Image (cartoon, helix red, strand yellow):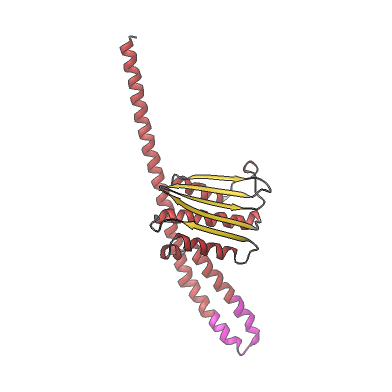
């Protein structure tokens, strides 16, 4: 084979490699867009269920609670039932808000994260700080991503880590947003656990937005979750 034929062969191989790379990039882009649409549909379904809880079950419990409270004035034995109905109503309202936090749409990410922390830690022996510094025009899908990752991480911190202190920080720098969540809980070793639905959900969401997710944890040394999202 002559030198010119070798050069032509090398050029053809490089061309085919470039074509293949372009096809792979297109497929990756299509998969990313599909994942985003699936997450958007999931959020839409949550919003619908949230409205059904509020308008359906919530209204029924409101009526029941008022009826029992009225009856309790003449029959003290009904007072306990009225209190249970009130607790059930409060739980339904809380679930409805957590499924689809309207505060995120109405007021933005900072008030929504502060509200989330207050509600999750209200009855816990956990001190927390929540610092959010982002632009008001942050895209809605990015705000939802940060809210859901924070929500899942804080729930894990309460249920599994047994933390006494939690820090949430969100900062926007030029063309990226960075989320850091730190707790002083019991930590874990990634090699010795089977990832649950919550951790898998966080990782899947991060991939859908081409975000860089890092989870650092070790037994008895707490956990740090860092998420960097390109804008």
Relative vertical location of residue 46 with respect to residue 207 in this rendering, above or below: below
Q: Tell me residue 182's x, y (percent).
A: 59, 52
Residue 194 in sight in this render: no
Q: Tell me residue 156's x, y (percent).
A: 60, 55
* 54 displayed left or right of 167: left
Residue 217 in sight in this render: yes
Residue 152, by quadrant, is bottom right
- Residue 63 lies in the magenta-colored region: no
- Residue 75 lies in the magenta-colored region: yes
Query: Which residue lies most toward the bottom here?
Result: 74
Residue at 38% x, 57% y: name it.
137
Q: What is the span of residues highlighted in magenta in the rendered image?
A: 65-84
Relative vertical location of residue 111 with respect to residue 85 in this rendering, above or below: above
Query: Which residue lies most toward the top here?
Result: 2
Residue 70, by quadrant, is bottom right
Q: Main secondary structure of the magenta part?
A: helix
* 100 displayed left or right of 166: left
Residue at 57% x, 63% y: name it.
120
Q: Tell me residue 23's x, y (percent).
A: 36, 34
Number of numbered discs visible in the structure rendering: 0
Q: Tell me residue 169's x, y (percent).
A: 52, 54
Residue at 63% x, 64% y: name it.
124
Q: Quadrant of the N terminus?
A: top left
Relative vertical location of residue 195 with respect to residue 89 in this rendering, above or below: above
Query: Which residue lies most toward the right here?
Result: 220
Residue at 48% x, 68% y: name it.
53
């Amino acid at each position: 084979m002559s030198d010119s034929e070798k050069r032509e062969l090398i050029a053809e191989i490089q061309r085919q490699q470039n074509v293949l790379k372009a096809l792979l990039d297109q497929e990756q882009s299509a998969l990313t867009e599909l994942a985003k649409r699936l997450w958007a549909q999931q959020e839409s379904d949550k919003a619908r269920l949230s409205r059904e809880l509020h308008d359906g079950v919530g209204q029924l419990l409101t009526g029941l609670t008022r009826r029992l409270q009225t009856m309790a004035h003449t029959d003290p034995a009904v007072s306990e039932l009225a209190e249970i109905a009130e607790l059930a109503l409060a739980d339904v309202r809380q679930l409805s808000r957590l499924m689809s936090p309207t505060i995120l749409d109405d007021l933005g990410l900072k008030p929504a994260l502060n509200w989330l922390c207050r509600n999750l830690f209200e009855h816990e022996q956990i001190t927390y700080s929540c610092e959010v510094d982002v632009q008001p025009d942050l895209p809605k899908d990015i705000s939802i991503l940060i809210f859901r990752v924070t929500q899942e991480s804080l729930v894990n911190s309460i249920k599994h880590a047994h933390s006494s202190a939690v820090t949430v920080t969100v900062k926007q720098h030029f063309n990226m947003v960075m989320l850091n969540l730190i707790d002083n809980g019991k930590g874990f070793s990634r090699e010795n656990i089977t990832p649950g639905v919550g951790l898998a959900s966080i990782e899947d969401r991060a991939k859908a937005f081409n975000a860089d997710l890092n989870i650092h944890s070790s037994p008895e040394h707490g956990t740090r979750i860092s998420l960097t999202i390109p804008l």
